[in-house]
Image (spheres, rainbow, N blue to C red):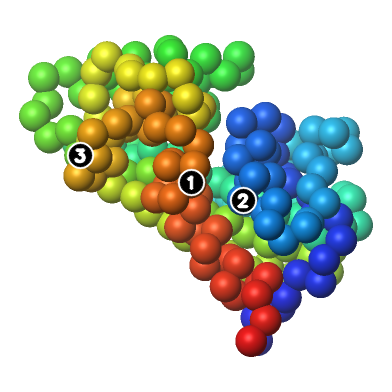
């Protein structure tokens, strides 16, 4: 049976300021008090999972256990069809230790080369974990294509090179409200809210 979040403080198991801000904005209507793992001084666990879901659950459980509070973790990334789904779960690692996503985007462009298939998808797994180890996990996907050069200064990560299907603007060009309406994170979040935050 699905477990509901009972309110109060929720740890966002991330040290990525952009991600914490985006999740915080999505949670705002529920009056949930969010605190980041970084603000609590929690270490980032090694992401040893072989999928977005496995890594989201690993991060959520680690933060919930360390903090004694429910924790929400996101594992997300860009999967490019012609690259066999890469960078995938290694999306952040392509940016290097200094989180240089200009370099990561340039790497995607370079590896793609003259490949005509530019189709890609953003995937997000959201896992809500409790200190006893219980997890509720949901996955959202948005399809689109890779564009070059990068466009727009909004968003974060690979947003400036991702053009959603049937869209005219990259995620990097969209206002936050427009991106939230269709993003992979928003799709996963909608499932999470329906299952764990809303009552019948």
Decide if residue 64 is on the left or right side of residue 177: right
Q: How much space separates mark 2 and mark 3, taking CA atoms?
A: 27 Å
In the rendered image, which residue does mark 3 sit on? 119
Q: Say which quadrant the C terminus sits in.
A: bottom right
Task: Choose mark 2 or mark 3, whichever is in front.
Answer: 2
Q: Which residue is mark 1?
A: 180
Q: Which residue occupies 38% across, 26% down?
A: 173
Asked if the residues shown at circle 1 and circle 2 are in contact, with their CB atoms under 8 angstroms apart, the answer is yes
Q: Secondary structure at mark 3?
A: strand
Q: Position of residue 121 (x, y in %)?
A: 31, 44
Q: Which mark is residue 10?
A: none
**Where is 191 relative to 72, above or below?**
below
Residue 109 sits in quarter: top left
Q: Are marks 2 and 3 in contact (CB under 8 Å)?
A: no
User: What is the x, y in percent for residue 104?
Assistant: 42, 19
Q: Is residue 101 left or right of residue 28?
A: left
The quarter of the picture where the N terminus appears is bottom right
Tell me the distance, in whole angstroms, between the alpha carbons under discs 1 and 2: 8 Å
Where 133 sits versus 121, above or below? below
Front residue of 196 and 25: 25
Q: Quadrant of residue 196?
A: bottom right
Query: Which residue has dot 2 on it?
Result: 26
* The quadrant where residue 172 appears: top left
Residue at 84% in and 38% down: 42
* Tag nearer the camera, 3 or 1: 1
Crowding at label 2, few (<14), some or many (≥20) Cα neighbours within 10 Å? Answer: some
Is residue 81 among what the camera can see?
Answer: no
Per the image, label 1 sits on a secondary structure element best described as helix
**Along the line of sight, which residue is nearer the eye, 151 or 69?**
151
Q: CA distance from mark 3 to mark 1?
A: 21 Å
């Amino acid at each position: 049976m699905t477990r509901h979040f009972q309110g109060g403080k929720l740890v966002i198991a991330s040290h990525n300021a952009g991600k914490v801000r985006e999740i915080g904005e999505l949670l705002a209507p529920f009056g949930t008090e969010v605190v980041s793992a970084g603000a609590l001084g929690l270490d980032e666990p090694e992401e040893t999972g072989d999928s977005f879901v496995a890594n989201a659950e690993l991060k959520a459980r680690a933060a919930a256990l360390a903090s004694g509070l429910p924790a929400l973790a996101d594992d997300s990334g860009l999967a490019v069809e012609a690259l066999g789904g890469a960078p995938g779960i290694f999306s952040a690692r392509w940016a290097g230790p200094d989180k240089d996503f200009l370099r990561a985007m340039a790497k995607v462009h370079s590896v793609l080369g003259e490949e005509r298939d530019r189709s890609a998808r953003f995937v997000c797994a959201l896992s809500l974990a409790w200190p006893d180890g219980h997890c509720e996990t949901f996955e959202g996907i948005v399809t689109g294509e890779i564009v070059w050069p990068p466009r727009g200064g909004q968003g974060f990560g690979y947003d400036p090179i991702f053009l959603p299907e049937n869209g005219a603007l990259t995620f990097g060009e969209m206002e936050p409200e427009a991106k939230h309406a269709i993003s992979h994170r928003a799709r996963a979040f909608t499932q999470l809210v329906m299952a764990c935050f809303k009552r019948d």
